[in-house]
Structure formats: C-alpha cells, structure tokens
Amino acid sequence: MLSRHYGAVARRTAATAAASARPVTEMTSRLPSGLTVSSVDLHGATSQLLIAYRSGTRYEPDNTPGITHVIRNNVGRDNERFYGLTLVWNSALQGANVSALITREIFAVRMGIYRDNVGIALPILGHLAVNAYKPWEVEEARETFEYDFCRRESARDELHRAAFRNGPLGKGVQAEKPSSISWQAIQRFAENHQLTEEAIVVGVNVDHDTLVNIAGSELPIKAGKSPIVSTASKYFGGDSRRQSGYPKTFVAVGGEGSSLADIKSVAAQAIAVEILLHVAQKVYPHARSVNYNYSDAGLVGVEFEAPNNSISSVSRSIFTAVKNAKADGEATKIGKAKALLKIMSAGESGAAVALDTATQILATGNNVSLAEFVEAVRNTSDNDVAKALSKASSKLSVGVHGSPQLVPYLDEL
C-alpha cells in the first residue's frame, strides 16, 4: 500500500514538474473592433476567463458615487437577449464559478472553468458582462448592499480620501447611498463605458487563437470608445475618518506610492511594504499590508484593527513605527525575499494573473510579465527601497472607521 501510494505521488510530482518546466506563453491582440484580447498559458488544467472594462470607481460621475458598486451587484441578471437565470444556470451546467469585482481602475466579471469547456463558457461570460439594467432588477439588487458592507474596506476608502481628497482615486469602492442612484443613470454609465475600446478579454490557460475567435464573433460588447476620461489624481496626505458605533476601530495608514507606469518604482514599493509590515508587526502582530498601484499614483502602508479600549496606544505605536521605518541592508534583504515569495505565489493563481493582466493593460496599455517583474524586484537596490520608504513616510495619510476620536492625528505624533 505504501509503495503504491508513493508511486502515485511520484508520478504526480513528475507530471507537475514537467508542466512547470514548460515556458509561460503570453500573447495580446487587438481586434478590428478595438477589443483587446490577452492570454497567459500557465499550462494548467483549469482556465480563468475575465472580461474587464476601464470603468472603475475613478470614472464615476461626481453626482453618482457608488454607481460601479450597483453595476457589480447587478451581474447575473437579465441582458438584452437572455434572462439572467438562463445565464447563471448555463454557467452552473459547465461547472463554472462566476464572480464580479470593482477596483478604482476596472469593473470585471470573471469565471473559473475546466479548460475543455472554454468554448462554451466564454460566450456565456460575455453575456453576463453586458447587462440590461432593467428598473425592477436594479431595485431588487439594492437589497444586497447591506451584506456587502465591510468596515475594513471602509477604512481603506477613508485612506484613499485622505490621500487623494477630491481626486478620482479618492472615490470609495463601497456605495454609501445606492438607493439614490437611478436605473437611468446606470444605463447611461454602462453605455459610455462598456464598449470594445474600453474592454479587455483575458484568458489564463486558454489557447490564444480560440480566445481571439470567440471574442471576435460571439461576445455582445458594443463597438465604440468612451468619451469620458479620468483626470490624474494628486497625492495630498492627511486624515479622513468615519464614525460608527462598533466595539472595534479599523485604521489604515500609508504614504505616497508609485504608478503602474514606473515598474522600477513599483518593484521598490513591493519591498518597502514588507519593511513597513515588519516594523508594524513588531509592535502589533495583527497588522496587515496595504499596497496599491494605479495608472497615475500609488499608496503603500499597513492596516489594523483593535478594540476601542486599546486602539489609541496601538495606533500611536504603529504610526511611529511606519514614520521611522528604515531600509538598512538586512531589512531590504528580508523584505525582498518576502516580496518575491508573494509575487511568485500570486503568479501561480490564474485568477490573480488574469486580474493583474487586465488592470495593467487597461491602465497603462502595457503588460509586464511575472518574469520581468521578478527580475525588477531582484535588481532593486537598497537605495531604491530607501527612496520608496522616504517618499511614503514623508507625508502620511490615515483612514479610520469606528471611533475616530480615539485615534491620534498625525500632527500629534
């Protein structure tokens, strides 16, 4: 029994090693309609499909904050050709996992599927990504928002408001008043953004020609380019706080990071955030990293929560640690090793690769491969990391959700 089990493990290990030895292939095409199609083959048996639009929260009109959240929560409902139940049922018949997400850069619908079923699944995903936003369905979807609210995400939203104030990146990813957003406004937003020149189809572990053929002939995305362009966000720094009656307070603290256009600085930021996390966890082991890169700016820091009777002392200790973080030789070496581990681990996740590919191409027009980014991190010097830390700590931002009167202000340190 033992020898037979060992033989099975050995065969699986050999098969995995053979698959991992094959080079990762990446291809990107632009169709005549303006739709971008990108594939990454990690040689896995399961595929990740993703359709994304350049329509994250930064593109929201100032008078309808939260509209992208409403759009996300309407995924799975009727479009112009099919009932939502039909689309969801057929996704289930293919054994697919479907989800939708929003960031400040993109809105995306994604699907995990057995590789052999891609030809059937991708057209279904295409229809899920194009909604009719019928008035009664928009109204029904409002009932889901109370389950979406996350206090930790609220603190991150406050961090962005403090950092970028009234700029596009200062808009939150959680809708605060979804009932005030009309179905007409939602339809107008979709008509302006859910267009071929604002979209990308990404397939991980999918044959590129198959992806191109289906994207070019079977997806119902309307041709066109959005007339709306997001302005650049300037980093300011400061405090933004939200009161709530909860026994814990959630805090996010960070400083200026780098845009996706500067890969060398993004690599330095990936190491710097590990150093910030290390010094924060020395004083409070429950701290977590905060690391954002956008088309025009970035944020880097840590987040944490604590009971209200201890949040003051915890906040003061972490703020001080982040402010005084240094990039000495050993700290950079450890930070680089931790950054590389996280990057390579994410590179093994088809969902993470698909999302990263879509974000990079829609935000910058280019895609830096995993191998290229790993090399950039490896080549990052101590001086590069020191500059990233100095940039981040020179003018911090703080976001708070809970009991803000218990959290010290930055100018009190």
Image (cartoon, helix red, strand yellow):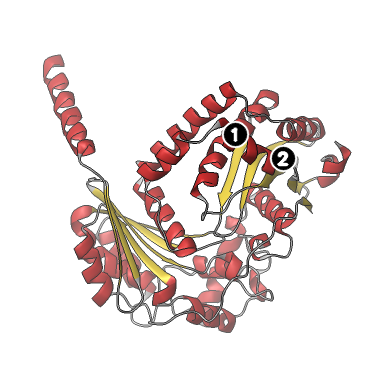
Apparent side of residue 247 relative to residue 87 in the rendered image (left or right):
right
325 or 355, nearer to the observer: 325
Q: Secondary structure at mark 2?
A: helix
* Residue under the image location 48 percent in, 68 percent down: 54
Q: Residue at x 38, y 67 (%)?
A: 200
If you read the primary sequence from the N terminus, does the residue marked by circle 1 or circle 2 appear first?
1
Please state which amino acid type lies under the numbered disc 1. Asn
Disc 1 on helix, strand or loop?
helix
36 relative position to 206: left or right: right
Give residue 8's position: percent from left, percent from top. 14, 26
Per the image, the residue denoted by label 1 is 383
Q: Residues within 10 Å of mark 2 (few under 14, many from 20)?
A: many
Q: Residue furthest top?
A: 2
Q: Is residue 78 visible?
A: no
> Who is closer to the viewer here, 125 or 380?
380
Q: Position of residue 93 (x, y in %)?
A: 25, 61
Report the front residue among 356 and 256.
Answer: 256
- Determine which of the numbered discs, if any, sits on residue 393 in the image: 2
Q: Residue at x 58, y 23 (%)?
A: 329
> Is 317 situated above or below 31?
above
